[in-house]
Image: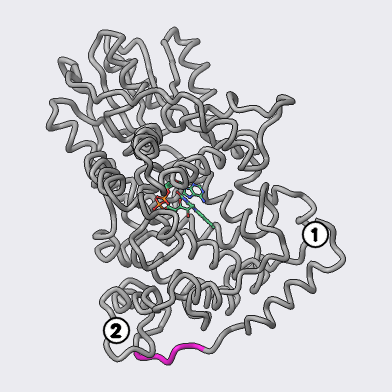
Amino acid sequence: KPTLLWLRRDLRLSDHPAWAAALKAGGPVIPVFIHDDTVASLGAAPKWRLGLGLGKLAETLDEKGSRLILRKGEALQVLRDLIEETGAGAVHWSRLYDPDAIERDKAVKSALKEDGIDAVSHAGHLMFEPWTVETKDGGYYKVYTPMWRAVKDRDVAEPLKAPTDLRPPESWPGTDDLKDWRMGAAMDRGADIVLPYQTIGEEAAQDRLAWFIDDPINDYNDARDKPAVNGTSGLSENLSLGEISPAQCWHAGMRKLNMGSKGAEAWLKELVWREFAYHLIYHTPQIATRNWREKWDEFPWNEDGDTPEVMAWKQGRTGIKFVDAAMREMYVTGRMHNRARMIVASYLTKHLMTHWRVGQAWFDDHLTDWDIASNAMGWQWAAGCGPDASPYFRIFNPETQLEKFDKKGNYTRAWIVEGQDEPSESALSYFDAIPRSWDIGPDDAYPEPVVGLSEGRQRALDAYKGRSF
Ligand code: FAD
């Protein structure tokens, strides 16, 4: 009997326990991706990027004599249809940990089991299943460092090799045409500009890991904070879609650590920040939608995403160079450097006293490495209302941050046209990427700050006064 392999955020062949288990069942394996509500509700950039990842995987499978079956609809119904069409006796998949996915997957599992189908979920998206990491008194970690200590010496299974025999069925069920899904529909604006910045698919992700491990990892401690330096792995988009597994990254980093590479531990720690984000969303699913610390519900945040100040933030025209460079970087590349993410998030939630959900929603729509858990944790961290968050009185000063991390102005030159005699191509491309309706162009004068840095800082501190967080 054939086995269905239900792919979601695990678009790879190697180190794929669900795929290995499906093959082990002995019959042919039919890989399927379902365009359901969770896909329909993705933001423009992540949906577009997912489409690119699916295209790449389909290509790879074709080359190996397999196929990626694409179907649209409610997951359980699609799986039942496919079971009927193919006579499959089992469905395997890799687990996800956000509340919507958990609810869907639980319902699918119990319904299929009632149908007499072997429905099996597997690890693969994380190294440490959230329920296996517990504090001494049996709770979950709310603070990162103790979680790091708890997992850093654990054995992470050696990554599995990609299967060589994908065992196709005698006949394939019908599939949608990826083009008809129009995954890039909402990206029409700057898709061709954003494309060159993407590292798409398993092979490209492995090459990128090899590049990073070969050398940049050695300088990671220092380079990772400099937004103009290509000093981080850039693997977040691949990890988010499962084009590479965290265990593959972990083992590569560990080998470097054992060779005495100075930056390796810091990098391994970042991989555990990703695990921590999933640990949190699993144990406290409200982190994606509500203030993690409820006391913050009373804080007088602006929740309007269309005020002139917030629009200036979205458009990279706040008059604060670090913020503007970063917002433009995201618009053009689908990515933003981590330090820059912290700065723009602090600026929006503190200087502009705007609710983190406004920023989260903008990121949801513009990041090609969008990840539900890391994005939510990052925003709540910056706003001060999350677990292990940056305290409310810690208000980043984007100017001193710029002096510290972009001394020579390379980052701002890369993204801000105004004031430059010979602007860089990347900075100019921003104006090709943005919608015409914004009515801004490279010849405009660079804007005055929408809020003075010390004025904005004081405004936020005054609003915090008298509250106990
Ligand atoms: P590297 O420095 O090479 O790190 C390796 C991997 O570790 C990353 O690929 C990522 O998977 C993980 N990692 C690194 N830093 C973090 C972190 N702070 N939190 C969680 N995981 C981390 N990351 C996303 O993947 N998707 C998001 O949607 C996202 N939104 C964010 C929003 C805000 C407000 C903030 C402050 C951070 C956000 N991050 C997000 C985390 C971080 O900025 C990115 O993971 C990082 O910039 C990716 O670059 P890299 O792959 O070169 O990372």
Q: Which mark is in front, 2 or 1?
A: 2
Mark 1 residue element: helix
Q: How many discs appear?
A: 2
Residue at image mark 1: 298
Residue at image mark 2: 423
Asked if one can make out residue 99 in the rendered structure from this viewpoint, the answer is no
Binning the other alpha carbons within 10 Å of mark 2 as few (below 14), some (14 to 19) or many (20 upward) gives some
Question: Which residue is painted at 51% across and 40% down in the image?
Answer: 272
In the rendered structure, the answer to whether residue 355 lies left or right of residue 178 reads right
How are the colours assigned in the image?
one colour
Q: How far across and down, in percent of the image, does residue 287 sit?
A: 64, 45
Q: Quadrant of residue 461?
A: bottom right
Asked if one can make out residue 32 in the rendered structure from this viewpoint, the answer is yes
Name which of mark 2 and mark 1 comes first in the sequence.
Answer: 1
Q: What is the chief secondary structure element of the magenta stretch?
A: loop
Point out which mark residue 10 bears: none
Q: How far across and down, in percent of the image, does residue 216 sit?
A: 32, 53
